[in-house]
Image: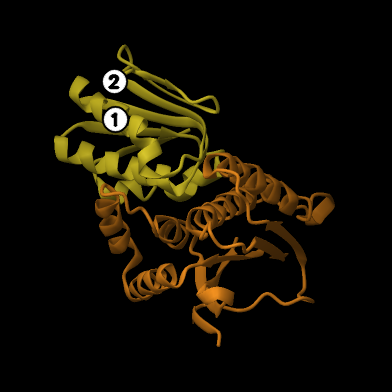
Amino acid sequence: MNETIGAYSPAEEDMAGETLTLRFSPSSVPLQQRWRNNGLSADFMADYVTTFLPADGGDAMPEAQRDQIRGAVNFIANELLENAMKYSAEALSHPIYIRLQLENARVAFWETNTVTAEQAVAFRAFIDRLLGSDPDEMYVEQLEKSAEGGSAGLGFLTMINDYQAALGWQFEPAVDGAVTVTTHVAVTL
Amino acid sequence: MDTIIDGGTHKVAYDPATRTARLAGVMRLNGMAEYAPIAGLLSQCLTKTDVLTVDVAGLEFLNSSGIAVLSKFVIEARNSGTALTIRGSKSIAWQGKSLANLQRLMPTLIMDMQ
C-alpha cells in the first residue's frame, strides 16, 4: 500500500516535455568511489537540460536564465543523488533511479531508492517535521544539530529556501521488509 | 592548521596580506566530517583578524553541506564580532540563490557581488 506526503505527483510514462532517467545498480563499490559519480551525473543532467532550452532567434532564452536553470538542475540533482547514496541500504539489492522532466520553464525530479523499515520510519518523522515547520527556522535548528553529525535534511531545506522547490514523497513497501522511497522535487524557473 | 587546502578540484587558502579567505573550484564533499578541515581553516581566520573577507567568486559549485558550513561560519563570525564581507560572483547561479540568505544569519554581513 503506497503512501504519499507533501506535493507529490507521480512520474508518468507518457508525460509531456523532455525526460531523462538514470538508473544506478546496487553496487559493492565503496561509497567514496560512488560519490564521484554524483557530480558527473548532476553536471550531465544540467548540461542535458540546457540543450532543450530555446537558443536561437527571437524566442531565444536569455543566457542568464539558461544559467539559472542549469545551476538549479545541477544543485538539485546533486543533492538527490547524495541522499540516495548515503541512505540506500547497502545490504539490500535495489537500484537507485533519478528522473528529470523539463516542460517549459518547470523542472521536476523523481529520485527513488530503497531503505530499511527503520530508516523509513525515521525519514517519515523528519518529513512530518519539515512539512509542519517554518523552513528558515528549521534550517538554523538543523545547522545547530549538524555539529553532532546529523546533517540530514539540509539539502531539502536548501531546496525549499533557496530554490522555492515544492517537495513530496512516496513510500512503497518493497520485498524483504524494506521500503522504496521516491522524492519528488518541482521547481519553476 | 594549514592555511592552504588543496583538494584537487577545490582549493581553500587564507591570505593574511589581504585578510581574505578564498574558496575556489567545485565542492561536493560528503557531510560535515569531510568539510571539517575547511571549517577549521575558516574558524582559524577569526583568530587572526577582526576584519575578514571570504571570497567565493571562484567557487563554481557548493553542495548543501558546504552551504551549511558557510552558514555556521557566518554565525560564528557574528558571535565573535568580526566584520565580515562575502565576495561572490553574479555570474555563478548558486551564489545568487544561496548567498543572500547568509545575511539573514548576520545582518551586518557585507555582500560584495561582482
Left/right placement of residue A70 relative to residue A141 reads right
The front one of B9 and B21 is B9
Circle 2 Cα neighbour tier, 10 Å, few/some/many (<14 / 14–19 / ≥20): few
Subunit under mark 2: B
Residue furthest to the right in view is: A57
**Quadrant of the rendering where the N terminus of chain A is positioned:** bottom right
Residue A30 in sight: yes
Answer above or below: position of A66 versus A92. above
Answer above or below: position of A121 versus A59. below
Left/right placement of residue A27 relative to residue B54 reads right
Q: CA distance from mark 1 to mark 2?
A: 7 Å
Residue B58 image position (x, y, % from top left):
51, 29
Total labels drawn: 2
Residue A159 image position (x, y, % from top left):
47, 59
Left/right placement of residue B109 relative to residue A45 reads left
What is the three-letter code of the residue carrying label 1?
Gly
For the colour orange, the matching chain is A
- Determine which quarter of the picture holds residue A21: bottom right
Residue A25 image position (x, y, % from top left):
67, 56
Residue B37 image position (x, y, % from top left):
35, 30
Q: Earlier in the sequence, mark 1 or mark 2?
A: 2
What is the three-letter code of the residue carrying label 2?
Met
Circle 1 Cα neighbour tier, 10 Å, few/some/many (<14 / 14–19 / ≥20): some
For the colour yellow, the matching chain is B
**Quadrant of the rendering where the C terminus of chain A is positioned:** bottom right
Q: Secondary structure at mark 1?
A: helix
Q: Which residue was labeled with disc 2?
A: B1
Q: Secondary structure at mark 2?
A: loop
CB under 8 Å between discs 1 and 2: yes
Q: Which residue was labeled with disc 1?
A: B40
